Image (cartoon, rainbow, N blue to C red):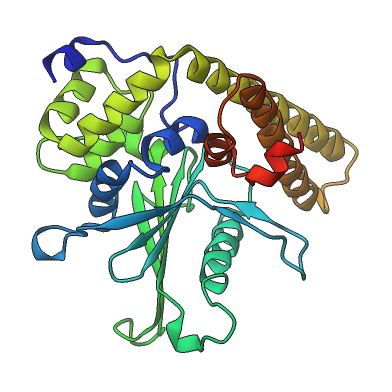
Amino acid sequence: MKNLLNNEPSLRFDPLSDYLFIKVMGKKGDEKQLLGFLNAVLGRSGKDQIKSVEILENKAFPKDVSTGKSCILDVLAVLQDGTRVNIEVQLRNEYNMDRRSLFYWSKVYSESLDEGQNYGELPNVIAINIVDFNFPPGGGMHTCFHLREDSDPSLVLTALEIHFISMVQWRKLKGRDVKNDSLHRWLTLLDKNSPPEQIKEAVSMDGAVAEAYRRLEEAKRDQEEYRAYWAHRKFEHDRISELDGVRNESLAQGREQGIIEGIEQGIEQGIEQGALEIARKLKARGRPFEEIADDTGLSPEAIEML
Protein backbone atom coordinates (compact mmCIF):
# COMPACT_ATOMS: atom_id res chain seq x y z
CA MET A 1 0.00 0.00 0.00
CA LYS A 2 2.84 2.41 0.81
CA ASN A 3 4.31 2.33 -2.71
CA LEU A 4 0.86 2.65 -4.19
CA LEU A 5 0.13 5.83 -2.26
CA ASN A 6 3.43 7.39 -3.29
CA ASN A 7 2.31 7.40 -6.93
CA GLU A 8 0.63 10.68 -7.79
CA PRO A 9 -2.64 10.00 -9.65
CA SER A 10 -2.64 11.25 -13.22
CA LEU A 11 -5.37 13.81 -13.87
CA ARG A 12 -5.10 13.15 -17.60
CA PHE A 13 -7.18 10.03 -17.13
CA ASP A 14 -10.84 10.30 -16.24
CA PRO A 15 -11.90 7.43 -13.92
CA LEU A 16 -15.48 7.98 -15.09
CA SER A 17 -14.64 7.23 -18.69
CA ASP A 18 -16.84 4.20 -19.33
CA TYR A 19 -13.76 2.35 -20.63
CA LEU A 20 -11.91 2.78 -17.30
CA PHE A 21 -15.03 2.47 -15.12
CA ILE A 22 -15.77 -0.95 -16.56
CA LYS A 23 -12.14 -1.94 -16.03
CA VAL A 24 -12.42 -1.06 -12.35
CA MET A 25 -15.73 -2.69 -11.40
CA GLY A 26 -17.45 -4.17 -14.44
CA LYS A 27 -15.76 -7.54 -14.90
CA LYS A 28 -15.52 -10.79 -12.95
CA GLY A 29 -12.82 -10.37 -10.33
CA ASP A 30 -13.96 -6.82 -9.52
CA GLU A 31 -16.48 -7.91 -6.88
CA LYS A 32 -14.60 -6.25 -3.98
CA GLN A 33 -14.69 -2.82 -5.58
CA LEU A 34 -18.28 -3.16 -6.76
CA LEU A 35 -19.49 -4.30 -3.33
CA GLY A 36 -17.83 -1.32 -1.70
CA PHE A 37 -19.33 1.09 -4.21
CA LEU A 38 -22.85 -0.38 -4.00
CA ASN A 39 -22.88 -0.36 -0.20
CA ALA A 40 -21.78 3.28 -0.29
CA VAL A 41 -24.42 4.40 -2.81
CA LEU A 42 -27.27 2.38 -1.29
CA GLY A 43 -26.32 3.31 2.27
CA ARG A 44 -25.98 -0.29 3.39
CA SER A 45 -23.96 -0.91 6.53
CA GLY A 46 -23.82 -3.31 9.47
CA LYS A 47 -26.36 -6.14 9.15
CA ASP A 48 -27.88 -4.54 6.03
CA GLN A 49 -24.58 -4.55 4.17
CA ILE A 50 -24.50 -6.31 0.80
CA LYS A 51 -22.14 -9.23 1.28
CA SER A 52 -21.98 -10.85 -2.17
CA VAL A 53 -22.49 -9.84 -5.78
CA GLU A 54 -22.25 -11.57 -9.14
CA ILE A 55 -21.05 -9.47 -12.07
CA LEU A 56 -22.80 -10.31 -15.34
CA GLU A 57 -20.51 -9.86 -18.33
CA ASN A 58 -23.16 -10.20 -21.05
CA LYS A 59 -24.54 -6.65 -20.86
CA ALA A 60 -25.94 -6.24 -24.38
CA PHE A 61 -29.71 -6.42 -24.89
CA PRO A 62 -31.34 -6.99 -28.29
CA LYS A 63 -33.22 -4.19 -29.99
CA ASP A 64 -36.67 -3.46 -28.65
CA VAL A 65 -39.24 -4.51 -31.25
CA SER A 66 -41.51 -1.51 -30.64
CA THR A 67 -38.84 1.21 -30.53
CA GLY A 68 -35.96 -0.28 -32.52
CA LYS A 69 -33.60 0.78 -29.72
CA SER A 70 -30.93 -1.38 -28.14
CA CYS A 71 -28.63 -0.82 -25.20
CA ILE A 72 -25.28 -1.97 -23.88
CA LEU A 73 -24.98 -1.50 -20.14
CA ASP A 74 -21.85 -0.31 -18.36
CA VAL A 75 -22.12 -2.55 -15.28
CA LEU A 76 -24.76 -5.20 -14.58
CA ALA A 77 -24.74 -7.30 -11.42
CA VAL A 78 -26.94 -9.55 -9.27
CA LEU A 79 -27.04 -9.25 -5.47
CA GLN A 80 -27.38 -12.21 -3.13
CA ASP A 81 -31.16 -11.71 -2.84
CA GLY A 82 -31.61 -11.73 -6.64
CA THR A 83 -31.86 -7.95 -7.03
CA ARG A 84 -30.30 -6.74 -10.28
CA VAL A 85 -28.25 -3.56 -10.34
CA ASN A 86 -27.42 -1.53 -13.43
CA ILE A 87 -24.78 1.21 -13.23
CA GLU A 88 -24.53 3.76 -16.02
CA VAL A 89 -22.06 6.62 -16.46
CA GLN A 90 -23.04 9.68 -18.52
CA LEU A 91 -20.38 12.39 -18.74
CA ARG A 92 -22.35 14.63 -21.08
CA ASN A 93 -25.96 15.76 -21.07
CA GLU A 94 -27.48 13.98 -24.05
CA TYR A 95 -30.99 14.95 -22.93
CA ASN A 96 -33.97 12.86 -21.88
CA MET A 97 -31.88 11.38 -19.06
CA ASP A 98 -35.03 10.52 -17.09
CA ARG A 99 -36.52 8.51 -19.95
CA ARG A 100 -33.17 7.01 -20.90
CA SER A 101 -32.70 5.71 -17.36
CA LEU A 102 -36.23 4.29 -17.27
CA PHE A 103 -35.66 2.60 -20.63
CA TYR A 104 -32.47 0.93 -19.40
CA TRP A 105 -34.15 0.00 -16.11
CA SER A 106 -37.07 -1.55 -18.00
CA LYS A 107 -34.74 -3.56 -20.24
CA VAL A 108 -33.03 -5.11 -17.22
CA TYR A 109 -36.42 -5.74 -15.60
CA SER A 110 -38.22 -7.28 -18.58
CA GLU A 111 -35.26 -9.28 -19.88
CA SER A 112 -34.95 -10.99 -16.48
CA LEU A 113 -38.12 -13.03 -17.05
CA ASP A 114 -37.55 -16.24 -18.99
CA GLU A 115 -40.24 -18.02 -20.98
CA GLY A 116 -42.50 -20.05 -18.71
CA GLN A 117 -41.83 -17.94 -15.61
CA ASN A 118 -44.61 -15.96 -13.94
CA TYR A 119 -44.48 -12.25 -13.10
CA GLY A 120 -43.85 -13.01 -9.46
CA GLU A 121 -40.36 -14.17 -10.42
CA LEU A 122 -39.36 -10.78 -11.79
CA PRO A 123 -36.48 -9.46 -9.67
CA ASN A 124 -36.15 -6.07 -8.04
CA VAL A 125 -34.01 -3.76 -10.15
CA ILE A 126 -31.88 -0.84 -8.98
CA ALA A 127 -30.50 1.68 -11.46
CA ILE A 128 -27.55 3.89 -10.53
CA ASN A 129 -26.68 6.77 -12.86
CA ILE A 130 -23.47 8.74 -12.41
CA VAL A 131 -23.81 11.98 -14.40
CA ASP A 132 -21.40 14.87 -14.97
CA PHE A 133 -24.13 17.47 -15.45
CA ASN A 134 -26.98 18.87 -13.38
CA PHE A 135 -29.63 16.19 -13.18
CA PRO A 136 -32.31 16.05 -12.00
CA PRO A 137 -32.96 19.81 -12.26
CA GLY A 138 -32.87 21.22 -8.74
CA GLY A 139 -31.52 17.98 -7.29
CA GLY A 140 -28.52 17.58 -5.05
CA MET A 141 -25.45 15.39 -5.19
CA HIS A 142 -27.39 12.14 -4.65
CA THR A 143 -31.07 11.70 -5.44
CA CYS A 144 -33.16 8.52 -5.37
CA PHE A 145 -36.61 7.87 -6.84
CA HIS A 146 -39.29 5.26 -6.08
CA LEU A 147 -42.85 4.58 -7.22
CA ARG A 148 -44.99 5.80 -4.30
CA GLU A 149 -48.64 6.68 -3.71
CA ASP A 150 -49.20 10.45 -3.89
CA SER A 151 -51.19 10.96 -0.68
CA ASP A 152 -49.39 8.28 1.33
CA PRO A 153 -45.67 8.02 0.44
CA SER A 154 -45.34 5.01 2.74
CA LEU A 155 -47.23 2.98 0.11
CA VAL A 156 -44.64 1.75 -2.40
CA LEU A 157 -46.02 0.14 -5.56
CA THR A 158 -42.90 -1.81 -6.45
CA ALA A 159 -39.22 -1.88 -5.62
CA LEU A 160 -38.33 0.48 -8.46
CA GLU A 161 -35.23 2.35 -7.34
CA ILE A 162 -33.36 4.82 -9.53
CA HIS A 163 -30.38 6.78 -8.22
CA PHE A 164 -28.67 9.80 -9.74
CA ILE A 165 -25.25 10.94 -8.58
CA SER A 166 -24.35 14.37 -9.94
CA MET A 167 -20.62 15.02 -10.14
CA VAL A 168 -21.40 18.71 -10.76
CA GLN A 169 -23.18 18.95 -7.40
CA TRP A 170 -20.44 16.86 -5.77
CA ARG A 171 -17.83 19.41 -6.79
CA LYS A 172 -19.93 22.17 -5.23
CA LEU A 173 -20.32 20.27 -1.97
CA LYS A 174 -18.69 21.90 1.03
CA GLY A 175 -17.60 19.93 4.04
CA ARG A 176 -16.75 16.66 2.34
CA ASP A 177 -16.39 13.91 4.91
CA VAL A 178 -13.94 11.40 3.47
CA LYS A 179 -13.23 10.07 6.93
CA ASN A 180 -16.79 9.04 7.82
CA ASP A 181 -18.73 8.87 4.54
CA SER A 182 -17.93 5.96 2.23
CA LEU A 183 -19.73 7.56 -0.74
CA HIS A 184 -17.57 10.66 -0.34
CA ARG A 185 -14.49 8.44 -0.53
CA TRP A 186 -15.69 6.88 -3.78
CA LEU A 187 -16.60 10.19 -5.40
CA THR A 188 -13.22 11.59 -4.41
CA LEU A 189 -11.57 8.76 -6.31
CA LEU A 190 -13.89 8.99 -9.32
CA ASP A 191 -13.63 12.78 -9.68
CA LYS A 192 -10.78 13.60 -12.06
CA ASN A 193 -10.47 17.02 -10.38
CA SER A 194 -9.84 15.67 -6.88
CA PRO A 195 -6.58 16.88 -5.29
CA PRO A 196 -3.97 14.10 -4.90
CA GLU A 197 -3.91 14.47 -1.12
CA GLN A 198 -7.68 13.84 -0.91
CA ILE A 199 -7.37 10.75 -3.10
CA LYS A 200 -4.57 9.45 -0.89
CA GLU A 201 -6.73 9.96 2.20
CA ALA A 202 -9.67 8.10 0.63
CA VAL A 203 -7.44 5.25 -0.54
CA SER A 204 -5.77 4.89 2.86
CA MET A 205 -9.10 4.55 4.66
CA ASP A 206 -11.01 2.10 2.45
CA GLY A 207 -9.81 -1.25 1.12
CA ALA A 208 -12.30 -1.33 -1.76
CA VAL A 209 -11.38 2.21 -2.84
CA ALA A 210 -7.71 1.25 -2.61
CA GLU A 211 -8.27 -1.75 -4.88
CA ALA A 212 -10.14 0.43 -7.38
CA TYR A 213 -7.25 2.91 -7.32
CA ARG A 214 -4.77 0.11 -7.92
CA ARG A 215 -6.74 -1.09 -10.95
CA LEU A 216 -6.83 2.44 -12.36
CA GLU A 217 -3.07 2.78 -11.98
CA GLU A 218 -2.51 -0.60 -13.64
CA ALA A 219 -4.57 0.48 -16.64
CA LYS A 220 -2.58 3.71 -16.92
CA ARG A 221 0.76 1.89 -16.92
CA ASP A 222 -0.25 -0.82 -19.42
CA GLN A 223 0.65 0.37 -22.92
CA GLU A 224 -2.12 -1.62 -24.58
CA GLU A 225 -4.73 -0.29 -22.17
CA TYR A 226 -3.28 3.21 -22.57
CA ARG A 227 -3.73 3.15 -26.34
CA ALA A 228 -7.20 1.61 -26.12
CA TYR A 229 -8.29 4.25 -23.58
CA TRP A 230 -7.20 7.15 -25.76
CA ALA A 231 -8.68 5.57 -28.89
CA HIS A 232 -11.97 5.35 -27.03
CA ARG A 233 -11.72 8.97 -25.82
CA LYS A 234 -10.92 10.19 -29.33
CA PHE A 235 -13.97 8.43 -30.69
CA GLU A 236 -16.14 9.98 -27.96
CA HIS A 237 -14.82 13.49 -28.68
CA ASP A 238 -15.36 13.05 -32.42
CA ARG A 239 -18.88 11.74 -31.86
CA ILE A 240 -19.80 14.61 -29.56
CA SER A 241 -18.40 17.21 -31.96
CA GLU A 242 -20.36 15.73 -34.84
CA LEU A 243 -23.60 15.60 -32.87
CA ASP A 244 -23.11 19.16 -31.64
CA GLY A 245 -22.59 20.29 -35.21
CA VAL A 246 -25.79 18.60 -36.34
CA ARG A 247 -27.76 20.04 -33.44
CA ASN A 248 -26.44 23.59 -33.87
CA GLU A 249 -27.13 23.51 -37.61
CA SER A 250 -30.68 22.34 -37.00
CA LEU A 251 -31.29 24.99 -34.37
CA ALA A 252 -29.90 27.68 -36.64
CA GLN A 253 -32.36 26.64 -39.34
CA GLY A 254 -35.27 26.59 -36.91
CA ARG A 255 -35.69 22.80 -37.00
CA GLU A 256 -35.49 22.01 -33.29
CA GLN A 257 -38.47 19.65 -33.44
CA GLY A 258 -37.19 16.09 -33.48
CA ILE A 259 -33.54 16.99 -32.87
CA ILE A 260 -33.30 15.03 -29.62
CA GLU A 261 -34.55 11.84 -31.26
CA GLY A 262 -32.00 12.25 -34.04
CA ILE A 263 -29.19 12.82 -31.57
CA GLU A 264 -30.16 9.72 -29.59
CA GLN A 265 -30.15 7.63 -32.76
CA GLY A 266 -26.72 9.00 -33.66
CA ILE A 267 -25.43 8.22 -30.19
CA GLU A 268 -26.58 4.61 -30.39
CA GLN A 269 -25.05 4.16 -33.83
CA GLY A 270 -21.86 5.86 -32.68
CA ILE A 271 -21.50 3.66 -29.62
CA GLU A 272 -21.88 0.56 -31.79
CA GLN A 273 -19.30 1.80 -34.30
CA GLY A 274 -16.90 2.73 -31.50
CA ALA A 275 -17.18 -0.75 -29.98
CA LEU A 276 -16.45 -2.30 -33.38
CA GLU A 277 -13.38 -0.10 -33.90
CA ILE A 278 -11.94 -0.91 -30.48
CA ALA A 279 -12.65 -4.63 -31.04
CA ARG A 280 -10.77 -4.56 -34.37
CA LYS A 281 -7.72 -2.99 -32.74
CA LEU A 282 -7.68 -5.39 -29.81
CA LYS A 283 -8.17 -8.35 -32.13
CA ALA A 284 -5.24 -7.21 -34.27
CA ARG A 285 -3.07 -7.19 -31.13
CA GLY A 286 -3.97 -10.81 -30.41
CA ARG A 287 -6.26 -10.30 -27.44
CA PRO A 288 -8.54 -13.32 -26.69
CA PHE A 289 -12.05 -12.96 -28.04
CA GLU A 290 -13.56 -13.39 -24.56
CA GLU A 291 -11.56 -10.43 -23.21
CA ILE A 292 -12.50 -8.27 -26.19
CA ALA A 293 -16.15 -9.19 -25.63
CA ASP A 294 -15.85 -8.09 -21.99
CA ASP A 295 -14.38 -4.73 -22.99
CA THR A 296 -16.77 -3.92 -25.83
CA GLY A 297 -20.04 -5.74 -25.13
CA LEU A 298 -19.83 -7.49 -28.50
CA SER A 299 -20.33 -11.23 -28.77
CA PRO A 300 -17.30 -13.48 -29.47
CA GLU A 301 -19.04 -14.56 -32.69
CA ALA A 302 -19.28 -10.97 -33.92
CA ILE A 303 -15.64 -10.36 -33.01
CA GLU A 304 -14.54 -13.44 -34.94
CA MET A 305 -16.20 -12.03 -38.08
CA LEU A 306 -14.35 -8.68 -37.89
Which image quadrant: the C terminus?
top right
Compared to residue 16, the image places residue 214 above or below, namely above
Residue pictured at 53% horizontal, 77% vertical: 113
Which image quadrant: the N terminus?
top left
| Residue 155: quadrant of the picture | bottom left
Residue 225 image point, x, y percent: 49, 20
Residue 157 image point, x, y percent: 41, 84
| Left or right placement of residue 224 versus residue 124 in this view | right
**Between residues 55 and 92, which one lies in front from this camera angle?**
55
Compared to residue 11, the image places residue 277 above or below, namely below
Residue 112 image point, x, y percent: 51, 71
**Between residues 36 and 89, which one lies in front from this camera angle?**
36
| Left or right placement of residue 86 versus residue 281 in this view | left
Compared to residue 136, the image places residue 290 above or below, namely above
| Residue 81: quadrant of the picture | bottom left
In the displayed orientation, state which residue is furthest to the right: 253
Residue 30 image point, x, y percent: 33, 41
Residue pictured at 40% horizontal, 38% vertical: 167
